[in-house]
Amino acid sequence: MKKQNIELKGKTILVTGAAGFIGSNLVRILYEMVEDIQIIGIDNMNDYYDITLKESRLEGLKKYSSFVFIKGNIADKEMVHSVFQKYRPRIVVNLAAQAGVRYSIQNPDAYIESNIIGFFNILEACRHSYDTEGAGVEHLVYASSSSIYGANDKIPYSVEDKTDSPVSLYAATKKSNELMAYAYSKLYGIPATGLRFFTVYGPAGRPDMAYFGFTNKLLKGETIQIFNYGNCKRDFTYIDDIVNGVIRVMRKAPERDKKEIRHKVYNIGNHEPVNLLEFVEILQQELVFSGVLPENYDFEAHKELVPMQPGDVETTYADVSELIEDFDFKPNTSIRKGLRAFAEWYRSFYQVEEKRL
């Protein structure tokens, strides 16, 4: 197991995408776990999905007196530069990105702006953090994605696998992030770790994700579409497992490898793919158990099996052996436990009247 070489206590930490699903949970848990820290959060609060969710997440972070929120776009180089100049963060976690595979087909400009230009600005700011007196960035942790495996036929996906066959622009931008971080680590000595997240879900998640969208439609009596006729498998990873993994990684910056480069990439996934039809079955059971839907709900009448969508892949499956070896950590929350937590949050947040017989 790798030795801890980063002390979080007493540090200033920058989290981009702080109003996002992963970002807001990371900020909250860092404050609960680590003493004497200051967290600077950046988020552009765009309306890709319901902004009231982002506002609600931020509201929950106001109780932390040292939390500073800045509404801004990381594609704004001057804004990023000014944040680094003013607060001089020692740890940077870049979670800001335009997400979504299918949306990248409809609106590619947003992905180039946030995922390429925005990440470039973060890398440049980290690079120049070493220019002035005093210590610069000790560790850059950034979000990659399981989507970069694209058309890879080998499963489970290993970080050693080739990732040069993306099937969406979103995946291509995330692959680009890894290449950019590698180059900056080599050229400027930035310790950087990329994390390939696998289908993150849980309470207060993203409404564009399947489990959330299915719930919205079922509650309205609409039909849900199950792609590839239900023959897809996803390595669903619960939000608390993701955040726990991120914090462990934050504390252990990569040491120099044989090429004198301080850059490393890891998968963070549950290592247990679930068939989409099984996933929907468990979701509907938990929606009934939590009182979101009545026990006599006719689920079969609200399902439609449809072909695969452009940009999708049939299976995602994380090989997490390196995560276990270096951090003694493996996500392990069951899909039922995770979906139950989501269903209970959904009923509370949207004030759904309990539908029990």
Image: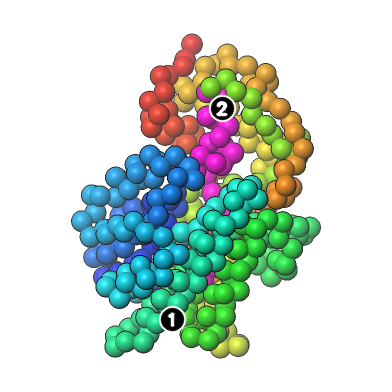
Q: Classify mark 1: residues with Cα within 10 Å, few (<14), some (14-19) or many (20+).
A: some
Q: Residue furthest top?
A: 357
Question: Amino acid type of disc 2?
Answer: Lys
Q: What residue is rendered at 51% in x and 39% in y?
A: 207
Q: Is residue 319 above or below residue 233?
A: below
* Left or right: where 194 falls relative to 171: left
Q: Position of residue 35 (x, y in %)?
A: 26, 63
How far apart marks 2 and 1 lie (CA) works out to 46 Å
Q: What residue is rendered at 68% in x and 38% in y?
A: 276
Q: Position of residue 223 (x, y in %)?
A: 64, 25
The magenta segment is 193-219
Q: Is residue 227 magenta?
A: no
- The secondary element bearing badge 2 is classed as helix
- The secondary element bearing badge 1 is classed as helix
* Quadrant in the rendering for residue 321: bottom right
Q: Is residue 105 above or below residue 255?
A: above
Q: Residue 251: tell me if it is visible.
A: no
Q: Which mark is residue 217?
A: 2
Q: Residue furthest right?
A: 153
Q: Position of residue 279 (x, y in %)?
A: 63, 36
Q: What residue is rendered at 64% in x and 29% in y?
A: 224
* Quadrant in the rendering for residue 178: bottom right
The residue lying toward the viewer, choosing from 300 and 247, is 300
* Left or right: where 337 falls relative to 350: right
Q: Which residue is mark 1?
A: 127
